[in-house]
Image (tube, helix red, strand yellow):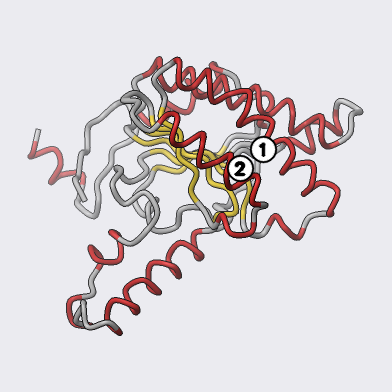
């Protein structure tokens, strides 16, 4: 892990987009209206990330636990996911954004899996912001599938158990080729990380805001960036040690 203590703009921002349902309720609208309004905030956050020089933006769209929600809502979310892929991928490609979907895709329909692959392929050569959508993703799932890969390598005789360390585990996780998370944002007011990127956010700065996701605009995003810029990232060292490195 590369340790950088004085950056003012995070290379990698991860966001739990929470509050769509409560936003809709406050507006006297059905839950699906909140999810649709949330898509606009996704678009705004992508645009502002590009503007501010963020390299990677990871958005928690659908967790592995969200399958427990009412069947009607899950179905609507899947439909909205497909619609958003169709409508947004051209804009992303035009703006040099690379799209990646992280998570266990096997639970999705063949049609959705094909659409995801097509969207990724279309933007694969883009060199600007990397937009990661975590769908059917969970931090524990990610660590579990990493350990499973390593166990298979050991079973095949390709890896010695004594060689398993933090680095070999990291390389088997999702988005191992990207920088770890610098700034972890959760909207909606809850103060928990909800099984999101557990390993990759080990040294992330946590930022919780009561702003509901559909209301998370550029001003709210900038407030989170300002908060990040004012923090001292010590990575286990003391403040005095860091002062001596200046």
Q: Is residue 10 above or below residue 111?
A: above
The answer to which of 60 and 85 lies nearer the viewer is: 85
Residue on which disc 1 sits: 81
Q: Is residue 1 above or below residue 38?
A: below
| Residue 92, percent from left and from top | 49, 22
| Residue 40, percent from left and from top | 65, 22
- Whether residues under marks 2 and 1 lie with C-beta atoms below 8 angstroms apart, the answer is yes
176 sits left or right of 64 in the view: left
Where does the C terminus fall, quadrant-wise?
top left
Secondary element at image label 2: strand
* Quarter assignment of residue 28: top right
Q: Is residue 67 above or below residue 95?
A: below
Give neighbour class at mark 1: few <14, some 14-19, many 20+ (Cα, 10 Å).
Answer: some
Q: Is residue 30 above or below residue 166?
A: above
Residue at position x 64%, y 59% from top? 107
Please tell me the numbered disc located at residue 3: none
| Residue 72, percent from left and from top | 86, 48
The answer to which of 192 and 139 lies nearer the viewer is: 139
The answer to which of 19 and 123 lies nearer the viewer is: 123
Q: Which residue ends up furthest to the right in the rendered image?
A: 28
Residue on which disc 2 sits: 61
Residue at position x 73%, y 25% from top? 37
Q: How much space separates mark 2 and mark 1, taking CA atoms?
A: 9 Å
Residue at position x 49%, y 18% from top? 47
């Amino acid at each position: 892990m590369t340790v950088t203590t004085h950056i003012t703009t995070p290379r990698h921002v991860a966001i739990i987009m929470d509050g769509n349902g409560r936003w809709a309720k406050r507006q006297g609208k059905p839950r699906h209206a909140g999810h649709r309004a949330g898509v606009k905030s996704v678009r705004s956050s992508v645009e502002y990330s590009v503007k501010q020089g963020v390299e990677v933006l990871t958005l928690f769209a659908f967790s592995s636990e969200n399958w427990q929600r009412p069947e009607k809502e899950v179905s609507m979310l899947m439909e909205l996911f497909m619609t958003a892929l169709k409508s947004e991928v051209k804009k992303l490609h035009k703006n040099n954004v690379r799209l990646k979907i992280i998570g266990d895709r096997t639970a999705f329909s063949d049609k959705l899996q094909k659409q995801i692959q097509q969207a990724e392929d279309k933007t694969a050569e883009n060199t600007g912001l990397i937009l990661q959508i975590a769908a059917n993703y969970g931090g524990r799932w990610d660590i579990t599938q990493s350990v499973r890969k390593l166990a298979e390598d050991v079973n095949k005789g390709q890896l010695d158990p004594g060689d398993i360390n933090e680095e070999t585990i990291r390389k088997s996780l999702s988005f191992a080729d990207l920088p770890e998370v610098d700034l972890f944002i959760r909207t909606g007011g809850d103060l928990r990380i909800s099984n999101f990127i557990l390993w990759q956010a080990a040294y992330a700065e946590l930022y919780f805001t009561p702003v509901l996701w559909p209301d998370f605009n550029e001003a709210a995003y900038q407030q989170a960036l300002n908060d990040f810029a004012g923090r001292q990232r010590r990575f286990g060292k003391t403040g005095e040690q860091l002062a001596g490195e200046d």
